[in-house]
Image (cartoon, rainbow, N blue to C red):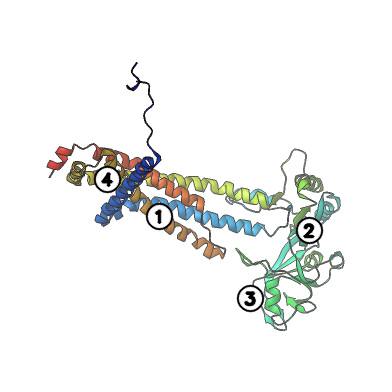
């Protein structure tokens, strides 16, 4: 065998690294050129392009405005629930969140109220709880001091000392309510930060006297601020001993809320079951019967909200998908018209050396650009519209980055799927016949 002749099994020569880099550079240059040509084609037909991307804009806008609003509402719910302390849960006659109609709420009306005696029994026997608080809201109106009065939005809460750690209330000045205040039904109160600043703008409120519903109360403490919430200023309240409130406003038909804080996170679930058993026993619920009270925590309420909004999210996603599908059909139609109009241009490009892949990439990029422009406008308008909810509830705005990315990817997918056939048709036009086209 002649060593100078190459063998049929010889390994072909490998291109040097600079040649590979030049090849890749040329590929990126081709893509960039195709992109610029696609942008020029979109700009050349502004009205047609605007009407085409309008369908994509509507589809993306509908899903973004809904998802942004739901994200704002979820943050608001989380903010509301953050009022409870760590590993804390609440027990009450009514559900914390109810999404049904009035007919389904009837069973809650029929339940017997949670009484003082039942709450005290749970507080004495719940060995896994570090604190148990009893509370209820008794009155709302204006509060007065020697320095002025407030709007009629002040809430008067009756609480026991266990509510302070369960509510994550931290005393900034003075002291919290004590068991002696409850046992002796004293006319003392602890003020939220906003109420203290409103009634005593120039000094400390501790030791001062305020009037609520015509009754004087001595201020023994002021809480640290917690900010605003859905109902307005959540520091705009006064807490008095529960016994004082029940003596003054009555006990008949009043159902209290139990706030239970477990000793640690490890025994949280056991503490919930212990309290459930104690309360079923105190309320004489038959074995096997459904609880006639509701137990909820921060996590359970957030999960309940997410479960409720799941149907909304799925419904909006389906409707938006239909809108994007219709927009994709419109884009395919416009791209086919564009291919017909630009047949001669395609023939000239093929005559001067453009390959099929160049034509294919150009028209696919044109479809993707149309979709992405509509998607970007829909995302911006959707986030702005959804954050009107944040403005209404006075909570920080939300930008759902996951849905933003999903919207952009969906637009790209629509552009590629519905732009491929017109691009393939343009790439496979006969160059000679294209040059003859008038």
Which callout, 2 or 4, points to the residue nearer the camera? Answer: 4
Q: Which residue in the protein does label 3 denote?
A: 151
Question: Could you tell me which secondary element the residue under label 1 belongs to?
Answer: helix
Which callout, 1 or 2, points to the residue nearer the camera? Answer: 1
Residue at 52% across, 65% down: 391
Q: Which residue in the protein does label 4 denote?
A: 335
Assess whether mark 3 and mark 1 are in contact (beta carbons under 8 angstroms): no
Left or right, 319 with respect to 364, comes to right
Question: Could you tell me which secondary element the residue under label 4 belongs to?
Answer: helix
Is tag 1's residue or tag 2's residue first in the polypeptide sequence?
A: 2
Q: Which residue in the protein does label 1 denote?
A: 376
Mark 1 Cα within 10 Å, few/some/many (few <14, many 20+)? some
Q: CA distance from mark 1 to mark 3?
A: 45 Å
Mark 4 Cα within 10 Å, few/some/many (few <14, many 20+)? many
Left or right, 160 with respect to 305, comes to right
- 355 is higher (above) or lower (below) than 230: above
Assess whether mark 2 and mark 3 are in contact (beta carbons under 8 angstroms): no
Question: Could you tell me which secondary element the residue under label 3 belongs to?
Answer: loop
Is tag 2's residue or tag 4's residue first in the polypeptide sequence?
A: 2
Q: CA distance from mark 1 to mark 2?
A: 51 Å
Percent coordinates x, y for residue 41 in the rendering: 26, 52
Percent coordinates x, y for residue 40 in the rendering: 27, 54
Q: CA distance from mark 3 to mark 2?
A: 29 Å
Percent coordinates x, y for residue 194 in the rendering: 67, 72
Left or right, 315 with respect to 327, comes to right
Q: Which mark is residue 245?
A: none
Q: Which residue in the protein does label 2 denote?
A: 133
Left or right, 318 with respect to 235, comes to left
| Residue 284 visible in the displayed image | no
Residue at 23% across, 46% down: 338
Question: Could you tell me which secondary element the residue under label 2 belongs to?
Answer: strand
């Amino acid at each position: 065998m002649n060593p100078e002749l190459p063998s049929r099994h010889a390994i072909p020569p490998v291109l040097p690294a600079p040649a590979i880099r030049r090849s890749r550079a040329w590929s990126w240059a081709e893509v960039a050129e195709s992109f610029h040509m696609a942008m020029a084609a979109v700009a050349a037909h502004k009205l047609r392009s605007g009407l085409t991307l309008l369908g994509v804009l509507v589809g993306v806008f509908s899903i973004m405005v809904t998802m942004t609003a739901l994200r704002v509402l979820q943050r608001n719910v989380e903010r509301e629930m953050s009022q409870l302390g760590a590993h804390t849960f609440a027990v009450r006659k009514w559900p914390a969140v109810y999404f049904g109609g009035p007919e389904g709420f009837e069973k809650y009306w029929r339940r017997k109220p949670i009484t003082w005696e039942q709450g005290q029994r749970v507080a004495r026997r719940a060995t896994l709880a570090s604190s148990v608080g009893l509370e209820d809201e008794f009155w709302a109106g204006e509060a007065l001091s020697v320095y002025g009065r407030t709007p009629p939005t002040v809430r008067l809460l009756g609480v026991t000392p266990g509510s302070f750690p369960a509510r994550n209330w931290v005393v900034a000045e003075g002291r919290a309510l004590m068991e002696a205040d409850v046992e002796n039904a004293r006319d003392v109160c602890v003020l939220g930060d906003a109420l203290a600043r409103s009634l005593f703008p120039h000094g400390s409120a501790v030791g001062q006297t305020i009037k609520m519903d015509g009754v004087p109360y001595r201020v023994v403490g002021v809480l640290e601020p917690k900010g605003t919430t859905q109902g307005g200023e959540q520091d705009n309240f006064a807490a008095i001993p529960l016994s004082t409130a029940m003596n003054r406003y009555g006990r008949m038909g009043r159902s209290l809320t139990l706030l239970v804080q477990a000793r640690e996170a490890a025994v949280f679930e056991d503490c919930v079951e212990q309290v459930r058993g104690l309360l079923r026993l105190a309320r004489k619920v038959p074995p096997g019967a459904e609880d006639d009270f509701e137990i909820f925590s921060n996590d359970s309420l957030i999960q309940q909200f997410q479960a409720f909004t799941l149907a909304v999210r799925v419904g909006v996603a389906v409707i938006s998908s239909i809108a994007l599908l219709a927009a994709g059909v419109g884009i395919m139609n416009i791209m086919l018209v564009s291919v017909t109009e630009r047949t001669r241009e395609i023939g000239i490009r093929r005559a001067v050396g453009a390959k099929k892949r160049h034509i294919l990439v150009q028209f696919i990029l044109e479809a993707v650009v149309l979709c992405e422009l509509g998607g970007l406008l829909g995302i911006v308008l959707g986030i702005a519209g959804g954050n009107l909810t944040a403005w209404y509830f006075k909570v920080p705005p939300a930008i759902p980055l996951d849905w933003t990315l999903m919207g952009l990817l969906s637009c790209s997918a629509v552009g590629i799927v519905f732009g491929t056939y017109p691009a393939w048709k343009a790439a496979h036009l006969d160059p000679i016949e294209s040059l003859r086209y008038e």
